[in-house]
Image (cartoon, rainbow, N blue to C red):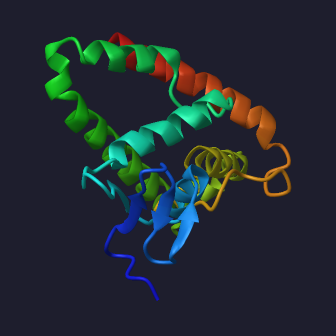
Amino acid sequence: MADTDKPLLIKRYASRRLYNTETSDYVTLEDIAGFIRQGREVQIIDLKTGDDLTRQYLLQIVAEHESKGESVLPVNVLTDLVRSYATGMQAVMPQFLASSFEMLRDSQAKMMENLSAFPNPMAAMPGYDALRKQQEAFLKTMMGGMPGWGGSGPAREEEAPDASDDITEIKRQLAELQKKLSKL
């Protein structure tokens, strides 16, 4: 059994093929994305030079998902990222992004913890169950497939039959928040 505490070592050969050193077989970018979704850290090394190519390949995975219409990064956020390379923000941007994602993970974990806590005095409030289901559907959709985020993938319709309208509203609210953040 593989040691999941250590990063999965992927070697890139001169032919640009990617080789999984644990399973001794070739892998694709989608395979690597799958390892990451399962919670594995990966490290991609150029076999000839020894250069760490992990960042380059992770950016390529994000770019491929974005090009398929699986947009996570709004245009204004991407624009701000590009601008940060030409300003003094370049030095603080990585820490800011890491802190933001850590806060989001922590908030999501606390929210899920609060939603599942019993007894819950808010449960007696009218409409509480509908609100709780809406929040769970939102969190599963937004955070699904990411380790430690409480979901195994996007919410399916049979789990939340009326979730599509709720998700549309949540996406609208999220877009508004992103606009406000980009103005800051």
User: Considering depth in this image, is 165 or 32 the residue closer to the camera?
Assistant: 32
Q: Tell me which corner region of the image, top left, top right, bottom left or bottom right, holds residue 165.
A: top right
For the C terminus, give its image quadrant. top left
Where residue 134 appears, x then y in whole percent? Answer: 68, 45
Asked if residue 36 shows in the view, the reply is: no
Residue 118 placement (x, y as % from top left): 54, 70
**Residue 57 sits above or below residue 44 on the image:** above
Left/right of residue 165 with respect to residue 93 in the rendered view? right
- The picture quadrant where one finds residue 88 is top left
Q: Please name whichever residue, 170 or 5, is drawn nearer the observer in this view of the structure.
A: 5
Query: Which residue corresponds to the image point at 83% horizontal and 43% vertical from the top-left?
Result: 162
As drawn, 157 above or below 39: above
Q: Which residue is drawn at 77% across and 42% down?
A: 163
Say which quarter of the image contains residue 31: bottom right
Image spot of residue 11 (x, y percent): 39, 61
Q: Relative to residue 18, is residue 45 drawn left or right?
A: left
- Position of residue 119 relative to residue 93, above or below, is below
> In screen coordinates, is 39 left or right of 152?
left
Depth check: 108 or 93 in front?
93
Determine if residue 75 is in view: yes
Q: Position of residue 149 (x, y in %)?
A: 49, 58
User: In front: 11, or 76?
Assistant: 11
Q: Residue at x 55, y 27 (%)?
A: 174
- Residue at image x 72%, y 29%? 168
Query: Residue most toward the bottom?
Result: 1
Side of 57 relative to 123 (left or right) = left
